[in-house]
Image: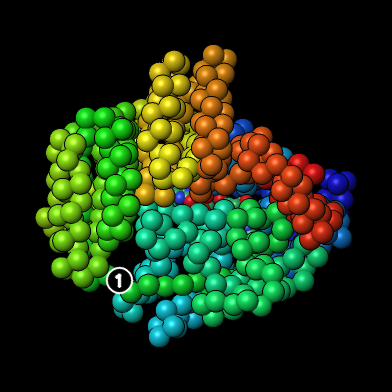
């Protein structure tokens, strides 16, 4: 494959001139990212500005049989942007225009490089917002490609639920449109959902139509501390079963709270903690927060935010959780693993994995979007220590096995990339073969992000 690279680069340089980058700095930035996995650099990077340019790059790469790795903001955690087979990283970050906002229909169309923060800034005057709120600086194209979710997914759903339609460039350069702006459709196969979560292995998303929501009238936030993680997770399950106006409900364990206090210079109780936010009308919010406080009878302390600034501070520490966890062992990135289980299985899953962690020497703070049954462990291991590598792998695979056995999934939101590839067979069985057949039908030369999700 790589023999064709010089000829391909000649072609690309004619069209893209200094937007073809081959310095080590550019290649390193596009082949390492936030993952714990060893970097794998692309051979060159192309900065794309339009859908037509993306089509031109893909046509040229197909002709020369050179791999293409789409790049949004590079925040993915499972090696999704790595280039284990070399090739061209196509950087979509300059495609950052909000194309249209339809206030009355509560939807918008954006280019793939727009970040969710930039979109919400753009929407500020409309009273509308886009709810998927990751802890990272990520592009909406990358978020769709990894089927991302965030703290408000318990209320609004994930990228799976909020993408109405896409413009996609296929591996041979053909440009297609999937879905529409209609809220529902029975018109044929749901290609939008096929591309959402495909991690750049089927085509490149250049535009997205997204659902928007009205900013709720009232919001209340509280932090609740518990004596045990079981008490905390059981409270989460009860709160969900009561159908309260929950906008977010998040969990951290004692180690994560210690990490948070060190990193964020706070003095929060160092015990299992739930963050909870209710939104809706003032009466609903007041009523449901009071109901929640009644349900949380095992809580040892409940602190309601009294001002909007207070609430922002409370959520800031939650959003900084990964960096706080990593700061427990400076210089160590750790495996940021995530699983998702049916909500009733959550207390058992959390308790069982904490028992496994206790048999190792690994520090593994826990934090999660528990309202969805989704939680993360940051496994802080030293890649130079054989024992720690073995222990971290053991925790990761035990967690995944438990989650799958409980009817859950090996990844609730971070995606598969390279890191979760070994677990897909156990999760999907023969359905994995169907995925591989779809991939071969759409990308017969395997040029789109090869080696990710599965090996062909
Ligand atoms: C501190 C931190 C917190 C995080 N919190 C969350 C969280 O709360 N929820 C969550 O879901 N994730 C979270 N993540 C993971 C990460 O932010 C998400 O996976 C995010 O969706 C990746 O977006 P990106 O723009 O950075 O994509 P990239 O990392 O650039 O790419 C991710 C994948 O998508 C593909 N891709 C990118 N753009 C396109 C495109 N236009 N068309 C087709 N394929 C494309 C890439 O090839 C790659 O396979 C977190 C990461 C960090 C570092």
Q: Is residue 197 visible?
A: yes
Q: Please, is residue 422 above or below residue 386 in the view?
A: below
Could you tell me which quadrant the C terminus lies in?
A: top right
Percent position of residue 415, x then y: 57, 47
The residue shown at (33%, 74%) is 214
Residue 346 location, x and y as percent? 40, 39
Viewer-proximal residue, 288 or 205? 288
Mark 1: C-beta under 8 Å from nearest atom of ligand 1? no
Farthest residue toward the left? Answer: 306
Crowd band around label 1 with a 10 angstrom C-alpha radius: few (<14), some (14–19), many (20+) = some
Q: Residue pushed farthest bottom?
A: 104
What residue is drawn where x is 32% and y is 52%?
241
Relative horizontal placement of residue 300, taking residue 13 as reference (left or right): left
Colour logic: rainbow
In this picture, is 11 found above or below 240?
A: below
Q: Quadrant of residue 424?
A: top right
Q: Position of residue 9 (x, y in %)?
A: 79, 56
Image: 330 above or below 243: above
What residue would you read off at disc 1? 215
Q: Is residue 346 left or right of residue 235?
A: right
Say what secondary structure mark 1 lies in: loop
- Whether residue 309 is visible to the viewer of this picture, yes or no, is no
Q: Residue at x 70, y 41 (%)?
A: 429
Q: Residue at x 65, y 68 (%)?
A: 190
Q: Nearer the viewer, residue 46 or 33?
A: 33
Q: Quadrant of residue 328?
A: top left
Counting every numbered tag in the picture gives 1
In the image, 226: left or right of 354? left
Which of 297/107 is in front? 297
Residue 340 locus on image (x, y percent): 48, 43
């Amino acid at each position: 494959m790589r023999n064709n690279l010089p000829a391909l680069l000649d072609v690309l340089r004619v069209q893209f001139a200094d937007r073809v980058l081959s310095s080590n700095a550019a290649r390193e930035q596009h082949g390492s990212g936030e993952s714990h996995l060893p970097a794998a650099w692309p051979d060159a990077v192309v900065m794309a500005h339009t859908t037509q340019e993306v089509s031109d790059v893909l046509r040229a790469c197909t002709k020369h049989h050179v791999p293409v790795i789409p790049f949004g903001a590079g925040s993915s955690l499972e090696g999704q942007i790595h280039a284990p087979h070399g090739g061209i990283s196509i950087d979509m970050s300059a495609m950052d225009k909000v194309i249209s906002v339809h206030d009355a229909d509560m939807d918008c169309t954006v280019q793939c490089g727009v970040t969710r923060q930039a979109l919400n800034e753009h929407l500020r005057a409309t009273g509308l917002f886009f709810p998927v709120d990751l802890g990272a600086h990520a592009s909406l194209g990358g978020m769709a490609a990894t089927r991302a979710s965030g703290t408000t997914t318990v209320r609004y759903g994930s990228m799976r639920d909020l993408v109405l339609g896409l413009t996609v460039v296929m591996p041979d350069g053909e440009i297609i449109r999937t879905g529409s702006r209609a809220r529902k459709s029975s018109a044929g196969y749901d290609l939008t959902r096929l591309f959402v979560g495909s991690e750049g292995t089927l085509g490149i998303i250049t535009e997205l139509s997204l659902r928007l929501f009205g900013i709720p009238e009232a919001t209340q936030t509280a932090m609740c501390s518990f004596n045990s993680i079981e008490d905390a997770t059981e409270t989460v399950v009860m709160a969900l079963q009561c159908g309260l106006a929950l906008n977010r409900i998040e969990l951290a364990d004692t180690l994560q709270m210690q990490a948070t206090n060190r990193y964020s210079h706070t003095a929060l109780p160092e015990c299992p903690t739930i963050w909870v936010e209710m939104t809706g009308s003032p009466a609903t919010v007041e009523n449901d927060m009071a109901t929640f406080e009644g349900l949380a009878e095992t809580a040892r302390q409940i602190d309601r935010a009294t001002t909007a600034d207070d609430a922002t501070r409370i959520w800031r520490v939650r959003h900084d959780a990964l960096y706080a966890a990593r700061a427990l062992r400076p210089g160590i990135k750790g495996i940021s693993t995530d699983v998702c289980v049916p909500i009733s299985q959550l207390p058992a899953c959390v308790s069982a994995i904490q028992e496994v962690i206790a048999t190792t020497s690994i520090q593994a703070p826990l934090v999660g979007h528990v309202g969805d049954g989704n939680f993360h462990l940051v496994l802080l291991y030293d890649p130079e220590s054989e024992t720690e590598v073995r222990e971290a792998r053991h925790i990761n695979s035990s967690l995944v096995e438990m989650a799958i056995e409980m009817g859950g999934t090996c990844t609730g939101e971070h995606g598969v990339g390279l890191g979760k590839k070994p677990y897909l067979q156990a999760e999907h069985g023969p359905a994995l073969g169907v995925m591989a057949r779809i991939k071969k039908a759409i990308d017969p030369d395997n040029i789109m992000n090869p080696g990710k999700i599965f090996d062909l």
